[in-house]
Amino acid sequence: MADTATQVHADETEETDALTDGFHLVIDALKLNDINTIYNVPGIPITDLGRFMQASGMRVLSFRHEQNAGYAASIAGYLTKKPGVCMTVSAPGFLNGLTALAHATTNCFPMILISGSSEREIVDLQQGDYEEMDQLAVAKPLCKAAFRVLHAEDIGIGIARAIRAAVSGRPGGVYLDLPAKLLGQTVDAAKGASSLVKVVDAAPRQLPAPEAVDRAISVLKSAKRPLIILGKGAAYAQADDDIRALVETSGIPYLPMSMAKGLLPDTHPQSASAARSLVLQESDVVLMIGARLNWLLSHGKGKTWGSQPKAFVQIDIEPREMDSNVEIAAPLVGDIGSCVSALLERMKENWTAPPAEWVAEVGDKVETNVARMAPRLRNKNVPMDFHGALGALRTIVKERPDAILVNEGANTLDFARSIIDMYQPRKRLDVGTWGVMGVGMGYAIAAAVETGKPVLAVEGDSAFGFSGMEIETICRYNLPVCVVVFNNGGIYRGTDVNPSGGSDVATTVFVKGARYDTMMEAFGGVGVHVTTSDELTQAVNAAMDSGKPTLVNAVIDEGAGTESGRIGNLNPQSVVAKR
Ligand code: ADP
Ligand code: TZD
Ligand code: MG
């Protein structure tokens, strides 16, 4: 009897040894492609998938809300040029992750959202399955590509397609639908192994056409007042040395978009950041590198760009970006690394620096504006205003240039962007193309996880609220993140009053005297309450030295901000209300 039992058991083991399943094929396919970190929220049908991933040595970080896991994945993609992966449950979890997927697509970050889904047969007949939703159809308009895998043998191909779609050409978000049934499907192990695909050259170089390079060089040479604009595409491309060499060889003043700050140090003599209005208005030829002429650049026209006619040279991997808002005189379509090195080669042969009067005019303006700002940054007002508080943080970032700065809010964002100088590429992570609130804690977590560097998250009190619960995640994984909440008691300001005279507070106002620092303490992190810029400096330095999860509640003057920060002009106006 005993012998028979042993025999049966041995046969069974042999049989399962020869099998693999959907769970394990997903893991093997990701690992084969060097994807080893997953940002997720567990639940049916992906709980075991997460467990098996962790057991297989992958890093699986669990969040409190899928949107934050999704933002983490999106910025992991930006920082690493590999797709960041967010994993969610079906319908509601999927929808929670979808905002981040759309955000990744909008910002050109490579990301894959993997969601479990319910029984196809029931979903398609709309018979009311657990978390029923036709997720593939919902995802499609919001991402670059969307795939569903129905057979375990196709998992390798499905994941390969998702990776290639996310990182090739203009990067973006990809949705991958994995029905519950797929995960449990078994396949012969050898057959399963041979179905996996290692993606070769996932983001191939795209060389610019020689005649396009000639055209770009000739337009640049015609300039009397040239300008270079660096966007976050340039930072993403990781062609840092060549971009710096191009700027320096050309001698042209440059303007970094917010996430391109630090590609060259903001203190670089050619930086025109402090003379933004002047260079946009007065330039005659503008070389755009990985930046779009969208709302952030006033669509390349109108008052911001002055009356001076412009000729644009634009480097972008996406051909359809050309002429999207204004005529592009010299489109240079290709990957930034290849395009920049092609221009650089030609400049090394023969190049004349831009006219000295232009360079001097820009330099003088920068100097005047920097000098004008300096005393405001040293102010010791109590309560702190944005300048005093950010002046303190500016010094900290100068002393710790390899720390990563995460930044969101309205005034907290706009003032920090112009006040805090960045010194290294890809160190400033912010609200991006949509100006979205809620990226803060997801970004901070992924930045710490992907780079191992300390993170300073400078957050408006409203902005922080969108992802605030993730401070538990920060404490759970003991990440070196210091969150500074700029607590001005509301959205833009804490001083609005309810115009009806009713007992509700105004729509933009929060609880007075809120103590966000005590939230951090609830999870075992360090909470500090500060009211002066010296206390702020001390608290942040201590956090950065210790690497302990810290939240600094920085009290900011309730009345210091302005409506919508710097973009109040985008608010529609009511003629009727003004009558
Ligand atoms: P910003 O907001 O900083 O102005 P955008 O997000 O508007 O930047 O623009 C980034 C641009 O960079 C996009 O048009 C995108 O197609 C492009 N891009 C991203 N990666 C690359 C790359 N490796 N090579 C060329 N262009 C790229
Ligand atoms: N919801 C989302 C997802 N994104 C948004 N951008 C907004 C709402 C609208 N919004 C802004 O554009 S800024 C902001 C909101 C709600 C918050 C500003 O308040 P804050 O910053 O406390 O974060 P300041 O320093 O008080 O201006
Ligand atoms: Mg606020």
Image (cartoon, rainbow, N blue to C red):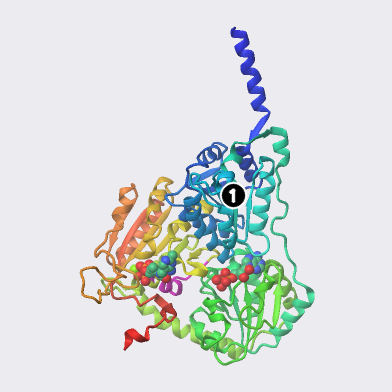
Is 225 drawn above or below residue 345 in the view shown? below
Report whether residue 454 is seen: no
Give the quarter of the figure containing the N terminus.
top right
Which of 312/251 is in front? Answer: 312
Is 388 drawn above or below residue 177 in the view shown? below
Q: Residue at x 36, y 79 (%)?
A: 375
Residue that mark 1 sits on:
177
Please tell me whether mark 1 sits on a helix, a strand or a loop: strand
Q: Residue at x 51, y 48 (%)?
A: 132
Question: Label 1 neighbourhood size at 10 Å, few (<14), some (14-19), many (20+)?
Answer: many
Which of 543/492 is in front? Answer: 492
- Which segment did they paint magenta? 412-423
**Mainly helix, strand or loop, the magenta region?**
helix
Q: Residue at x 68, y 50 (%)?
A: 160
Is 50 drawn above or below residue 490 in the view shown? above
Q: Residue at x 56, y 52 (%)?
A: 134
